[in-house]
Amino acid sequence: MAPSKGQKRPAAQADIDADDGPRRTRSKSTGEASHSKHRTRSSAQSLSPTSARKPPSSNTPPSAKKNFVKKGTARPVKKNAKSNITTSSSRNTKPAAKTASRRESFARVSISDDGNHKGGVAANEDDEEDNEDGPSYWLMKAEPNSRIEKGKDVKFSIDDLKEASEPEAWDGVRNAAARNNMRSMMQGDMAFFYHSNCKSPGIVGTMQVVREHSVDESAFDKEHPYYDEKSTRDKPKWCVVHVEFRSKFHDPVTLKELQRYAKPGGILENMQTLKMTRLSVSRVSKKEWEFIHTLTDSAEQGAPPTTNVTNS
């Protein structure tokens, strides 16, 4: 009933009637405006000295007492049974072991020189387990056909590597992800030699890393096809590894054949070079390495190493 003339309305009712629009507030989690009745209730409660929250009485149901926390007291603390880590009841803490494992799985992911995160180079945890007692495996691409860049032929084939009298520097890599893979290589690691940018691209043989990464001098040469003015001797961006010929396949494993086994559920489904086709240096798992060798009938074995495997 409306109050008579000169009579004051209750403060709570005046506050409600003054705003005829919808009651809207900000959601704490999303920041989006959402409909709420709490604004009307809080306005009335704030004007009443008896509106403060009271502790549950003896007649209060157990379910209501359970979540009641007296003002000024800390929330109850409980232990996480799985990780044996003490946590707050309002937050779940990840076990330390899981955090450490996640850190290790991303250990090989690097930041490029321009500060951008480069994906696709993280080591697969299963691969690490496969290779922990032996070498790591890689795939490295080169062009077997002549192509002139800045007056120089950039051709390099498995036969050129076979005829080399000393370890060959694998230079000219100008992709950050491929470079990061080269920096991860260790002496004794094995790699597939892959012919690219040709009529029948594919794996044609194997080679071995005999010297670990060092500065790529070709990046400083203005006459070189892959000169990079941003790479300086004070702050070099690119690197090389030295490799030696180990074998040449009589029956190359073509790209089309590799793709046959890269379908969902196939053994080469996660092969890096098939997922990142423009990557010139990619990782190969032990299982992939062994399986690909079964796709070729025979291989022409190379001569013993011409030099001792050394660090650089």
Image (cartoon, grey):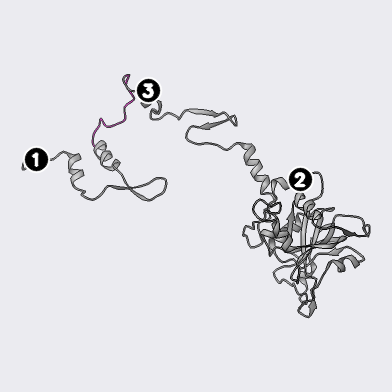
> Comparing marks 1 and 3, which lies closer to the viewer?
3
Mark whose residue sits in front, 2 or 3? 2
Q: Amino acid at mark 1?
A: Pro
Badge 3 element:
helix
Q: Is residue 246 left or right of residue 38?
A: right
Describe residue 287's horizontal placement relative to residue 165 as left or right.
Answer: left
Q: In the image, what residue type sits under mark 2?
A: Asp
Front tag of 2 and 1 = 2
Residue at x 38% of width, y 51% of height: 32
Instruction: Determine crowd level at label 3: few under 14, some 14-19, many 20+ residues with C-alpha closer than 10 A.
Output: few
Where 180 falls versus 9 (above or below)? below
Residue shown at the point (31%, 27%) measured from the top left? 54
Q: Is residue 68 left or right of residue 186?
A: left
The image shows residue 26, relative to residue 203, as above or below, that is above
Q: Gap in Å between the C-alphas at discs 2 and 1?
A: 85 Å
Rendered view: 26 above or below 217: above
Q: Residue furthest bottom?
A: 151
Look at the image and tell me in which quarter the C terminus lies: bottom right
**Dot 3 amino acid type:** Pro
Instruction: Please tell me in which quadrant of the rendered image residue 166 appears.
Output: bottom right
Residue at the disc numbered 3: 62
- Which sits in the foreground, 284 or 202? 202
Snapshot quadrant of residue 262: bottom right
Q: Which residue is mark 2?
A: 130
Q: Secondary structure at mark 2?
A: helix
> Are the residues at dot 1 and dot 3 in contact (C-beta closer than 8 Å)?
no
Give the residues drawn in magenta, as a range.
47-58
Front-lying residue, 233 or 61? 61
6 shown above or below 153: above
> Does residue 235 appear anywhere in the picture?
no
Q: Which mark is residue 3?
A: 1
